[in-house]
Image: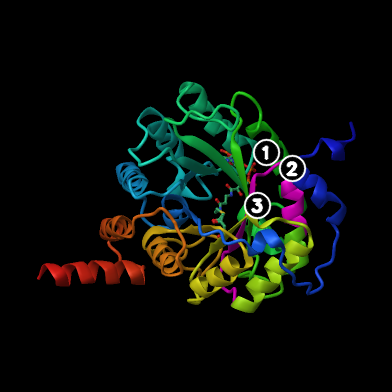
Amino acid sequence: MSRLAALPRRLALLHPLRRTTCAARSYSTASEQRLDNRVKIVEVGPRDGLQNEKNIVPLVTKIELIERLAKTGLETIEAGSFVAPKWVPQMANSSEILSHILATPPTSPHPLTYSFLAPNMKGLSNAFSILNQNPGTFSTETNPLPSKPSLEIAVFASATETFSQKNLNASIAASLEGFRAVISAAKETPYNLRVRGYISVVLGCPFEGYDVSPHRVAEIATELLEMGVDEIALGDTTGMGTAPRTKDLLNCLRSAGIRNEDVAMHFHDTYGQALVNTAVALEHGIRTFDASVSGLGGCPYSPGATGNVATEDVVYFMESLGMDTGVNLDGVADVGDWISKELGRGNGSTVGRAVLGQRKRKQE
Ligand SMILES: CC(C)(COP(=O)([O-])OP(=O)([O-])OC[C@H]1O[C@@H](n2cnc3c(N)ncnc32)[C@H](O)[C@@H]1OP(=O)([O-])[O-])[C@@H](O)C(=O)NCCC(=O)NCCSC(=O)C[C@@](C)(O)CC(=O)[O-]
């Protein structure tokens, strides 16, 4: 069987289109026009939200944050990052977090997926050693165990060379080559893990500005899908994205044959555009959105970038449009209030502040 014939159907469809140019070709398919009101929110607060905190957040606080979030109806929580501790010291205790999740799965209304970044084989083997110590405690792609947590790992590429060097100490091509081994090892038995592939700075780079090619993003996404990732997460790391640029990028990916169901959007709100861009992506047909409780976050390699769009804001916004996130707004607003106080900072969610303020006024 040829390599192409062995590829899953979505990749076989993609393959001939790999080098497609992205002339502004805008069309919608019947499947994209279908009314689909289910939206998945990926909570990235415990990883992306905390990784940039100057003071090391105690392990107990991180675990309590995950446990509180698990109760709110979220389906996926990004819980840590197996990266070099000298690069991102805040994530140094990700092994302990994974161990704790497996030994004592947080109480939740339904089984949850926990995601961890792993940029290289060293990070993946650190994750594997925790899994090996806890056999049978997690669900896999091939052996779903409804009462046990599922696990996902995430690799992260960049859309610009400068960001790739700063974030990964490697060119885009070298990082992708390294991910190939990580993705295939993660998918091997007995682990059979789901894999997410981030692409950072897709709508603006802290070093190369707005000069980010959507064609290049489509090429990288295609390459990651061909390697076997289950989902592409498009990171507007700097929050420089605007509505027209988001639309152009998504149209370009569509022209390259990438399906909406394989794409998640990861907006930061540095310029206050995250919800507008979310609306554009939603209208385009995307149904998976990353968010961070109380808008925690920032990227250590993106100077000046502030937090991810707040989970509370996304939940309220989606519900106002009749979309179903499955997330309890009051519950997540309480978590946002709690973690903001724990970190000694203001609550970064406008909606969170409004929900809590209204509740307080009712009680007075
Ligand atoms: C990829 C590397 C490791 C290369 O870093 P390097 O220095 O080129 O790697 P190296 O292979 O030369 O190793 C250097 C040292 O790090 C160790 N090492 C090497 N790898 C690991 C590992 N996985 N876990 C633990 N230790 C590791 C390795 O063992 C060695 O230790 P030493 O011999 O000096 O004692 C480094 O660049 C790195 O860790 N970068 C991480 C950067 C990062 O975490 N950035 C933030 C996450 S991405 C993000 O936030 C964006 C996103 C995802 O949210 C989406 C968006 O908003 O755009």
Whether residue 171 can be seen here? no
Q: Find residue 227 and name its label.
A: 2
Tell me the mark number nearer the camera, choosing from 2 and 3.
3
Mark 2 in CB contact with mark 1 (< 8 angstroms): yes
Range of magenta residues:
219-242
Q: Residue at x 57, y 66 (%)?
A: 282
Dot 2, crowdedness within 10 Å: few (<14), some or many (≥20)? Answer: many
Dot 1, crowdedness within 10 Å: few (<14), some or many (≥20)? Answer: many
Q: Amino acid at mark 1?
A: Ile
Q: Nearer the viewer, residue 176 or 249?
A: 249
According to the picture, the residue beneath numbered tag 1 turns out to be 183
**Would residue 298 appear left or right of 4 to someone viewing this image?**
left
According to the picture, the residue beneath numbered tag 3 turns out to be 262
Q: Amino acid at mark 3?
A: Asp
Mark 2 or mark 3: whose residue is earlier in sequence = 2
- Which quadrant would residue 66 be assigned to in this image? top left
Q: Residue at x 25, y 60 (%)?
A: 341
Q: Residue at x 33, y 56 (%)?
A: 332
Q: Nearer the viewer, residue 32 or 114?
A: 32
In the structure shown, which secondary structural element does the residue marked by tag 3 occupy? Answer: helix
Residue 291 inside the magenta-drawn segment:
no
Q: Position of residue 64 (x, y in %)?
A: 30, 44
In the structure shown, which secondary structural element does the residue marked by tag 1 occupy? Answer: helix
**Would residue 340 appear left or right of 274 to someone viewing this image?**
left
